[in-house]
Amino acid sequence: MIRTAFLGLGAMGFPMAAHLAQQAQAQGGQALVWNRTPGRAEAHAEQHGSLAVALTDTAQADLLLTCLPTSSEVDEVMQTLLPHLRPGTVWVDCTSGHPDAARRQQETLAARGIPFLDAPVSGGTVGAQAGTLTVMVGGDAATLAQVQPALAFARKVVHVGGTGAGFAVKAVNNALLAVNLWAAGEGLAVLGRAGVQLGAALDVINASSGRSNATENLIGQRVLTREFPATFALGLLAKDAGIASELTQAVGGSAPVLAQVAALLRGAARTVGADADHTAALKAIEAMNDLELR
């Protein structure tokens, strides 16, 4: 039995850690959990049977998973844990982090005999709750094969390349989400100003070639209803789109659409609020067109 520790119990981490706790209990063990706010970890222990521990105590685990806002928070946690980690412990970072940070973190841990995988996830809070997330993994394939059975929150696990590749795929994936969301918002704003009923227009789009995840699963349920439920923060989407733009520069590529949408999201995060749901970015388009999408 692999003993797991999950660090970071946010909107995604809380249900992800619940699947680890359930798996551990089925094997006669107990998953460790930690959160910067201790009450969050204690609530997880009460609800899911995990064990809330101090940060340094998570070093007892064979498999240590992090799911934090950015690579900077992972750096902070790593510096605290380094003196306590045992060689052979595997660190799997599910943060939507930066490829450069992954390579630096991998080198730091490798010097102590600790394998590192960058393994961000996709599927949103619904997928996290259902245990159907897709995991894109960068790093050593043999290490992934060793720990993959313990990733109880995943339905699909894909090895995408060397260290940093997981974070790179995640950043571009989320940049594409942003592009689709923003473009659909602009299109609907134009139709709204033309007097078209937006619910009907969305029905047509979703049965036609203009459809996307944004039109099928986000705009109708979150924007036209004016609910904007807090699931994935706009500031985090802007961060991920920014990483994709930085990656473009690093590889000498040309991706002007990704760069433009990354800039638009930065502006939207400042005006709408970084903590708002990412679909609230369309409020910036509403302001530009003097029209509410409903």
Image (tube, rainbow, N blue to C red):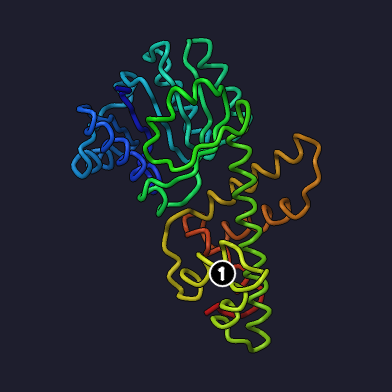
For residue 137, say whether it is visible.
yes
Front residue of 31/223: it is: 31
What percent of the width, then of the height, locates residue 196? 63, 87
Q: Specify whether 202 is left or right of 18.
A: right
Provide the residue designation for mark 1: 283
Name which residue lies at 61% across and 48% down: 173
Residue at 74% over, 41% down: 248
Q: Which residue is pictured at 63% across the width and 79% down the height?
A: 290
Front residue (pair 245, 128) = 128
Q: Amino acid at mark 1?
A: Lys
Q: Residue at x 43, y 16 (%)?
A: 82
Mark 1, other Cα within 10 Å: few <14 / some 14–19 / many ≥20: some
Quadrant including the N terminus? top left
Q: Nearer the viewer, residue 25 or 249?
A: 25
In the picture, residue 108 is in which quadrant?
top right
Vertical placement of residue 277 versus 136, above or below: below
From the top left corner, tell me how far across and down residue 47 is, in percent. Answer: 21, 45
The percent coordinates of residue 168 (x first, y second) are 63, 38
Q: Is residue 92 left or right of residue 160?
A: left
One can see residue 105 in this view: no
Q: Secondary structure at mark 1?
A: helix
**279 vs 65, nearest the viewer:** 65
